[in-house]
Image (cartoon, rainbow, N blue to C red):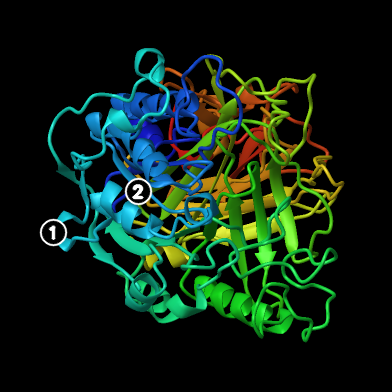
Amino acid sequence: MKRRVFFSAFLSMLIVLSMVASTFAEPWKFGIISDTQWTTTDPAHQNPNTIPASIIKQVNQQFININNSTHDLKFVIAMGDQVDVGTQANDYVRALYSQDLYNAGIGFYPMRGNHEAAYGTYLTSDQDFWHAYPQIGFTPANAGMNNMTPSDITTALITDPLVLTNNPPAAFSGSAFQVGSNFSYPTTANTTNSSVSYAFQYDNATFMLLDQFKSYDYYTSHIIPEQQDWITNTLSGRPANTHAFAFTHKNILGGNHKDNMFGGPANGSDPGDGYGIAPGTPIPTETSFTVGDKQFAENTFLELLQTNKVKYMISGHDHHHYNSVVTSPDQQSKVHQLICASDSSKFYNPGLPVSPNDTPVEQDLQRLGYYIFTVDGPRVTIEYYADNHGSWQSDSNYPYGSIDLVNYPLRTTPTLTFVKRSTTGYSLNGKEQLVARGASYAMTDDTTVAATMESGFIGTSMAILSGTNGSMAATNYGKPTSKAVNTGWAAKTADTISDVLFLWGMTDLGATSTDKYVLSMSYDPSVVVNTEMINEGYIVAVDTKDANGNWVKAVDMNVGGGKKFVLGPWNKVYPLGTYGVDPKTKTAWAVINTTGSGQFAVVENH
């Protein structure tokens, strides 16, 4: 009887990392590839038609490997500037280098960048885009149908015949397959202005790919306001408690490029949002368009994203990895911008001026990269992968970026080794706290919101009791980064006596440990903890799953420190590795410098 009491009442209090399936749907993934441009000589004869096919195929293989392993990577989004020189032949050849994804059952959803749209007299790129990618739905019957590259798009368009020996596109295989539904389009922008904006739904998410370009002024055009009604209806009309992801080629606030999705800068002191510049200042090359007009467009758009719980505005164009929080010029709205690392032979270094309305979270320069988004019910985890070489420089043949004839110009692509550089995320049922350098991590959250979205929650609260952002990370122009700490929740499982906490944003880019912090979580108040049970060997620990899926103490995952169990409340004198349970407050706690997989719960375990 005593043994049964132990197991039914309390075996141990553990803050653990656990993999918990969403009650919304099974987790699924999508990938991002950005700015696939080849700008240099090609001595290896692998990169035709200004396309870095040698890089594309290696990145595509990463997506295929993930799907072969997990069987849940559904499609890849391409962030524009798929070619360096926009022509019909180049755009069509780029479509051929998506075939390996189609053959693996992975969909492909591209957008145009300024390089597809802005070259000379090439004014039919919108028509060519609809033709090369039937899945984006110019013909409604084809919307969402992948692996339907038209028969007139062939390898005969490849300008270098040696590529057909050294690095040909994959041969067609299989049949057409459906990915996504409910495709929609901004009729006026697409028909009148030759834009290529579209949106679709997949599972519990809406994807909105915004094309800001119009004929004939492709490069500096910014027709987001003309699409505002469609954007509003697309975001506000989606099912409740679902995600929305917004994409555009140009940034909200770029690091190197000060032109953005709302137009060009007013002058050399304009960081992109007109900060510090008189509203009446005209924007060069524009007709009756001022800094004030541009700021109004940005205020309207960011308010729309915030109101509709669009957490990230995702872009390319700037050829480096950058995660930041952008505040609108009127200070009323905020959104994360994710500028995606490129898969190109050119690289940009950000520089001044920068707006105080941009709060940097992560910056990574001169690497080739890609992204994996995992959607798990209300939770989204974002993994950024990049090559382990780094320090790439733009080739001397290209007049922009950091020209360096000594340090690794990318002329012939090596076999790339990709490593995970960061993991971040958010949840529709959690909260975010920006923590500046030197500021406290102290925060609280509970499952009140989560319980309105999913069933099965018993009611759990979390607190970071102690810890300071001691990071010295900064941008290349010297601005300190902040930590964007996000929480999320999943309902308890049969193995836990609390709901499950998700925690993102504690780790510096490329780091293996966090600052020391104290995490506390409440547990089921019906569970009884007493000294007799502890003396019987039922200890309290912070656990995580190891590589084999076995539970191990999270303090074992700390970098440095010892291990010590305490029955009672946390005390500020306790060093790294101390862990315990406080029966009076029904909380378990641990002093750690790890987030493991980022998931924590209180469970019973001997």
Residue in the image at 57% along x and 73% along y: 302
Above or below, 443 relative to 366:
below
Q: Quadrant of residue 102?
A: top left
Res 75 seen here? yes
Residue in the image at 64% along x and 50% along y: 323
Q: Who is closer to the viewer here, 538 or 76? A: 76
Q: Nearer the N terminus, badge 1 or badge 2?
A: 2
Above or below, 431 relative to 586:
below
* Number of numbered labels in the structure image: 2
| On-image quarter of the N terminus | top left
Q: Bin the neighbour count of mark 2 within 10 Å (Cα to Cα): few under 14, some 14-19, many 20 and up.
A: many
* Secondary-structure class at tag 1: helix
Circle 2: residue type:
Tyr
Residue in the image at 60% along x and 65% along y: 220
Above or below, 24 relative to 158:
below
Res 207 seen here? no
Inter-mark Cα distance, 1 to 2: 16 Å
Q: Bin the neighbour count of mark 1 within 10 Å (Cα to Cα): few under 14, some 14-19, many 20 and up.
A: few
Q: Is residue 509 left or right of residue 120?
A: right
Q: Is residue 187 left or right of residue 229?
A: left
Rendered location of residue 39, percent (x, y): 59, 33
Q: Who is closer to the viewer here, 295 or 528? A: 295
Are the residues at dot 1 and dot 2 in contact (C-beta closer than 8 Å)?
A: no
Rendered location of residue 243, percent (x, y): 39, 60
Q: Who is closer to the viewer here, 583 or 392? A: 392
Question: Which residue is most to the front?
Answer: 121
* Secondary-structure class at tag 2: strand
Circle 1: residue type:
Ala
Which residue is the site of mark 2?
A: 109
Which residue is the site of mark 1?
A: 141
Q: Is residue 421 left or right of residue 276?
A: left
